Amino acid sequence: MKKIEAIIKPFKLDEVKEALQEVGLQGITVTEAKGFGRQKGHTELYRGAEYVVDFLPKVKIEVVLADDMVEAAIDAIRKAAQTGRIGDGKIFVTNVEEVIRIRTGETGPDAV
């Protein structure tokens, strides 16, 4: 099993969610986040004064899935989240040793 974490632009969340549903994923976890990468934030003007916004709003999506679905999920996220501009985000894939469904006690891929 693998865990996919994707950091994306907030306005792309619905498109990514729909793309993941189309490839057969049943559940995702979404967290509001702030951060910056190469873009290093941006400058804004407020009441005549300039100030730097270091941390930009992002959305973190987490999905745990069977190994055979990983490539399809990554492809779906990448295509749906891509704008072609700096700050589109990142996708991280890590191994998951065990999953346990609290309600039933199911383990492994059955618990996902």
Image (cartoon, rainbow, N blue to C red):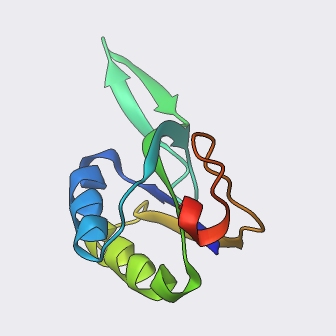
Q: Is residue 3 left or right of residue 7?
A: right
- In the picture as drawn, the residue positioned furthest to the right comes out as 97
Relative image position of residue 22 (x, y in whole percent):
22, 73
Q: Name the one closer to the observer, 60 or 41.
A: 60
Q: Is residue 106 left or right of residue 11?
A: right
Relative image position of residue 41 (x, y in whole percent):
50, 44
Q: Is residue 74 above or below residue 12?
A: below
- Is residue 81 visible to the viewer in this orientation of the structure? yes
Q: Residue at x 51, y 88 (%)?
A: 68
Q: Name the one closer to the observer, 39 or 24.
A: 24
Relative image position of residue 34 (x, y in whole percent):
53, 38
Relative image position of residue 20 (x, y in whole percent):
31, 68
Q: Residue at x 37, y 31 (%)?
A: 44
- Is residue 92 visible to the viewer in this orientation of the structure? no
Looking at the figure, which quarter contains the N terminus?
bottom right
Location of residue 47 by image quarter: top left
Q: Is residue 90 left or right of residue 77?
A: right
Q: Name the one closer to the observer, 24 or 30.
A: 24
